[in-house]
Image (cartoon, rainbow, N blue to C red):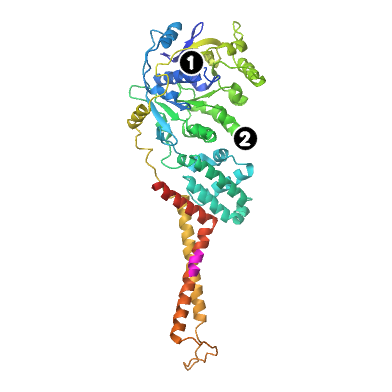
């Protein structure tokens, strides 16, 4: 599995290795469904872990969870190990694993704050147009200017309601702020909330260092994200992984070209990141992939088709494992041709033809050698994994999560004083001030309505006529005056709660109460 400073991938006419010193030059694992991409990912994760390199990977189908358990002896595994001269070094073993889950069901919850996500990724997540993205940027700018913390979705919803109320004022300062655009963003936030996105925003936020741990015996921790449920919201999945990649880029210091990566990041179902992505986002991905190498992070995209990855990104992926592709349509034929052309040619192979002939567990492999030059492509039998093929049981997963050094840390939800609470207090204070002002005005009106007296103290005659008994008249007058003040104040509060901000705050309060039961 690990030979000196190399990870054993499999056997062709010779042993095929991935050199650790060049592993942060990124890579690509491609192939049709069922051709062995997951196993290739698994054996690379095992190799990195054995070399002391932490790994992060998304488990889309649940199969990768088996890396936490030792494999079981099977004839076809033993046969493959013998075919590639791996029989003596082949052992079954488990690897140190930590499970994560955005929804907190199959692993430790992962959260970030709205501020850390930022307007660019949020706009992508919410599928906003350029005008709506501009309004979202204004909201973030206002939050910075007024010291409002944006931690969770209710903070952002309250802030947007506040922006709508002040749209005329803010338009003069920040540019046009349309209430219609604010409403569109609020509707998208509601959709995200119903898809479970609310669980992703809040505190405690993920500390990247918790994914970069090693064990006492020097092996790298394999962080596995349970993504089976997350895949039902593909935009959330892709945005989350891009955010995580961006956090690594921003948080980690420059280390140049280390002897081995500090972390290896596998981006499964990579096509979801680029599907219908705006140009600005693709440029951001290209920049991060190009520069994160100097932070000691290797990024490996896993997808079905090489055409799923833009050329600007594809050009930076030096380590390639290509499983079988089918070519029944013109687009598929183009993909096969494109895949073949990305390899360094081998005079003994018709690469384009071989791609369509590969069996399960076979791949075309080309990795970077000394001085970063790609090796000649070889038809390779991929080695069998040492860990379990297939998923863990629910009980096995729960046991690993319970014994994790992070058990109970991310499960505890924090709710600091942030934009929602600040704006709520402002609205309540404004309502109280308005009520007091109305009460003062009512008192002044009452005073102006009292009977006038002469200088001698005698009351001027009342020329009006009122046939009601005096006692009843006085009682009704007092009740009318008292009611007018209370009713007026109540109407003021109702107007405040009926405003856009008030409605957002009431929904947030009711939402939190509902979640508490």
In the image, the segment drawn in magenta is 487-492
- Residue beneath disc 2: 278
The picture places residue 303, in percent across and down from the top left corner, at 55, 23
Q: Quadrant of the N terminus?
A: top left
- Within 10 Å of the Cα at label 2, are there few (<14), some (14-19), or many (20+) other Cα atoms? few
Residue 96 vs residue 328: left or right? left
Mark 2–mark 1 distance (CA, rounded to whole Å) = 34 Å
Q: Nearer the viewer, residue 514 or 116?
A: 514
For image coordinates 45% across by 9% down, the residue present is 80
Viewer-side label of 2, 1:
2
Q: Nearer the viewer, residue 52 or 490?
A: 490
**Residue 177 visible in this rendered orientation of the protein:** no
Mark 2 vs 1: CB contact within 8 A? no
Residue 274 inside the magenta-drawn segment: no
- Within 10 Å of the Cα at label 1, are there few (<14), some (14-19), or many (20+) other Cα atoms? many
Q: Quadrant of residue 120?
A: top right
Residue 489 inside the magenta-drawn segment: yes
Label 2 sits on a secondary structure element that is: loop
């Amino acid at each position: 599995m690990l030979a000196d400073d190399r990870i054993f991938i499999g056997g062709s006419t010779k042993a095929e290795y991935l050199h650790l010193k060049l592993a942060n030059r990124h890579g690509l694992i491609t192939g049709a469904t069922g051709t062995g991409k997951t196993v290739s990912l698994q054996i690379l994760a095992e190799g990195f872990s054995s070399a002391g390199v932490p790994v992060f990977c998304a488990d889309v189908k649940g199969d990768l969870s088996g890396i936490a358990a030792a494999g079981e002896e099977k004839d076809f595994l033993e046969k493959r190990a013998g075919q590639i001269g791996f029989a003596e070094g082949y052992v079954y073993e488990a690897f140190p694993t930590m499970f994560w889950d955005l929804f907190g069901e199959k692993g430790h919850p992962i959260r970030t704050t709205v501020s850390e996500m930022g307007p660019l990724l949020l706009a992508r997540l919410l599928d906003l147009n350029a005008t709506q993205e501009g309004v979202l940027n204004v909201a973030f700018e206002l939050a910075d200017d007024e010291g409002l913390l944006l931690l969770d979705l209710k903070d952002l919803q309250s802030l947007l309601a506040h922006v709508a109320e002040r749209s005329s004022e803010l338009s003069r300062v920040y540019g046009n702020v349309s209430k219609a655009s604010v409403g569109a963003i609020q509707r998208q936030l509601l959709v995200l909330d119903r898809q479970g996105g609310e669980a992703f925003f809040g505190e405690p936020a993920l500390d990247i260092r918790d994914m970069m741990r090693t064990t006492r015996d020097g092996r790298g921790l394999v962080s596995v994200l349970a993504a089976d449920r997350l895949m039902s919201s593909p935009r959330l999945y892709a945005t989350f992984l891009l955010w995580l990649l961006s956090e690594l880029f921003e948080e980690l210091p420059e280390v140049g070209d280390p002897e081995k990566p500090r972390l290896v990041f596998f981006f499964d179902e990579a096509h979801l990141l680029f599907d219908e992505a705006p140009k600005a986002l693709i440029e951001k991905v290209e920049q991060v992939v190009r520069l994160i190498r100097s932070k000691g992070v290797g990024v490996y995209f896993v997808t079905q088709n090489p055409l799923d990855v833009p050329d600007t990104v594809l050009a930076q992926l030096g380590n390639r494992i290509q499983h079988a592709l089918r070519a029944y349509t013109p687009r598929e034929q183009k993909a096969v041709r494109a895949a073949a052309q990305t390899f360094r040619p081998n005079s003994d192979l018709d690469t384009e033809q071989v791609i369509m002939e590969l069996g399960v567990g076979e791949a075309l492999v080309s990795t970077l050698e000394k001085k970063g030059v790609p090796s000649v492509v070889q038809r390779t039998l991929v080695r069998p994994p040492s860990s379990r093929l297939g998923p863990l049981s629910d009980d096995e997963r729960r046991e690993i999560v319970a014994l994790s050094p992070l058990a109970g840390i991310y499960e505890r939800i924090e709710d600091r004083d942030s934009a929602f609470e600040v704006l709520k207090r402002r609205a309540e204070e404004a309502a109280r001030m308005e009520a007091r002002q109305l009460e003062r005005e009512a008192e002044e009106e009452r005073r102006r309505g009292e009977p006038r007296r002469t200088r001698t103290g005698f009351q001027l005659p009342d020329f009006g006529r009122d046939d009601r008994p005096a006692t009843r008249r006085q009682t009704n007058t007092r009740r009318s005056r008292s009611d007018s003040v209370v009713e007026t104040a109540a109407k003021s509060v109702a107007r405040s709660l009926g405003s856009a901000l008030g409605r957002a705050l009431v929904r947030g309060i009711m939402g939190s109460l509902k979640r508490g039961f």
